[in-house]
Image (tube, rainbow, N blue to C red):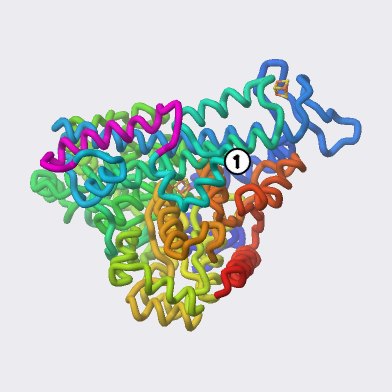
Amino acid sequence: MEYSDKILSRSIDPSVHDMLTHAEGLGLETVWDRYEAMLPQCGFGELGLCCRHCNMGPCRISPFDEEGPKQGICGATADIIVARGLIRMIAAGAAAHSDHGRDIAHTLLLTAEGKGGGYEIKDEAKLMALAAEYGLEVDGRSKEDIALDLARAVYGEFGKQEGPIQFTRRAPEKRVALWKNTGIDPRGVDREIVEIMHRTHIGVDNDPVNLILQGLRASVADGWGGSMIATELSDVLFGTPTPVRSEANLGVLKDDEVNIIVHGHEPTLSEMIVAAAQDPEMLALAEKYGAKGIAICGICCTGNEVLMRHGVPIAGNFLQQELAIMTGAVEAMIVDVQCIFPALGALTGCFHTKFISTSPKAKFPGATHIEFHEEQAYDIAKEIVRMGVENYRFRKPGQVHIPADTMACMVGFSVEAIVGALGGTLDPLLGAIKDGAVKGIAGVVGCNNPKVQHDYGHVNILKELIKNDVLVVTTGCNAIAAAKAGLLLPEAAELAGEGLKSVCQALGIPPVLHMGSCVDISRILVACAAIANALGVDISDLPVAGAAPEWMSEKAVSIGAYVVSSGIFTVLGTVPQVLGGPVVTKVLTEDANAVVGAAFAVEPDPFKAAKLMIDHIGEKRATLGI
Ligand code: SF4
Ligand code: MSK
């Protein structure tokens, strides 16, 4: 099929070309249309130069007009306004991840108390390891008692007034010492987020560097706190991922089965939806309505969670959420929190699809709200699955348009799984890095953004890195892009340089390893800490680099900040709203090197971005003498 230039410019994914053409035929708008309608976007906002922190404003600094204002009404300069805006983004991102972690801790607490509504402790070995890390008594105690103590201890991390957050001590000693010396070793997770809100109120902290340091402190509380808590306790409750095969892209939707999509970020409900979809009563009901089965699939990070633990197919990443509905084959779109378009309400109204919101924290126009409570988890999940199944009879076959595109993938490379694939120790990987077969490791993560061609940055940076013998670990929507492009298959080693190819072929692993959802970037931190400790160096000494080629969310700002604070050079593919502050821009891209041993770069071209990362890895190798 021939597609218009406009449609080809929006994505590299053929399923997206197909669905955007279909959308045009139906006269339906998408995120790309709304983006174009928004152009030109506000120049002050793009540079981070507007402020609404008090009602003397709004204020904006004019870089465009010599005569225009150079200070806000209170006297705030461009750098003050930019720094405050930036760290408020970090606060929001850290809050989102950390509230996710808190919810998982709550679920563990209820499960330990016997009020879990169907949950169980699936990874007892991890429970015991975490209990030891927290110094909890384990001898002669039931796993529920230990889990109760662990859940309470972890809960305490959020409201702690004084540090440290336990998991931060997984970082190499040199890194912890650096955090202490620079004043960015976080206290409680909530405390650091609240302090950002305090400092950015009018008339409090008006030193751009001091503001940024607090942003870094809150981000460390996210990466080594809230996000890591979410990851670790999810593993305890739902199992630590191990490699599993599945499929990706919109073609995973079935034309003869009930299709239920789980979308958002938290795994608590989706775990139960997967279980309820296998309930004989639900399967019989589906058969009664003429469906051959119940197909669950995912979008965004809720999708990543059930993909890596159950091999549940993934229908797409962030920019494909509307397109999934437009297939006319989705009986229910079930959402929890984060990255869900409010536009879905009006869109589902054009189809038979039920749009079901479930979190008391996240309600949407046009959605049916079925509130999720962990205490009745399975029963609520079954009720939602039932709604989807009963909706199958209202599907209009003439409206169904499912793209053919699917791709096989291998996912679920937790740190434990990677160590398992290496034969129980990191030594083979360290050996491959030392002898140069693997030049280094890149973490490539993050969202899609309609400002750039969908998946172009993701796929090309990955291909370029592996071609140059850089092993890639991926999470979030980058991981989904990689899956759709066939890069999460052992056969993709053919695209790698000779060294990486031989390592992947010997181990039977893909050159791009799926490590999970956005909070699972904490797994990358744990892996980096383990490698640094094995080599007796700091993370900033390692031949590693990070990238977020198409990022858009505030969570990504917090992620970037904690990755850099951990000592990892990071390249951003979309331009952050900070360039109006020259001091802030210099601190982030240059001066941070002297403070935390790493900095940001901004490079929209994925080939140039990969080159920056490869050069950085080469420099670190030279310094290490390998
Ligand atoms: Fe304007 Fe200052 Fe108020 Fe911001 S805090 S809106 S710059 S007066
Ligand atoms: S889902 S935060 S669009 S990666 Fe984690 Fe994707 Fe970004 Fe949401």
Question: What is the x, y in percent for residue 489?
Answer: 37, 71
Residue 264 seen from this side: no
The kind of residue tagged 1 is Thr
Q: Is 133 covered by the magenta stretch?
A: no
The secondary structure that most of the magenta stretch takes on is helix
Mark 1, other Cα within 10 Å: few <14 / some 14–19 / many ≥20: few
In the picture as drawn, the residue positioned furthest to the right comes out as 67
Residue 276, compared with residue 494, is above or below; it is above
Residue 579 in picture, x, y percent from top left: 73, 44
Looking at the image, which is closer to me, 357 or 582? 582
**Which residue is tagged 1?**
182
Would you identify the image quadrant in which residue 426 lies? bottom left
Q: Quadrant of ligand 1?
A: top right
Residue 283 shows in this picture: yes
Residue occupying image coordinates x 51% and y 57%: 539
Q: Give the residue displayed 15% in from the left and 48% down from the top.
A: 286
Determine whether, in the image, residue 397 is placed left or right of residue 486: left
Residue at 44% over, 51% down:
521
SS at mark 1 in the image: helix
- Compared with 246, 522 (above or below) is above
Residue interval drawn in magenta: 138-165
* Quarter of the rendering occupied by the C terminus: bottom right
Left/right placement of residue 597 relative to residue 344 reads right
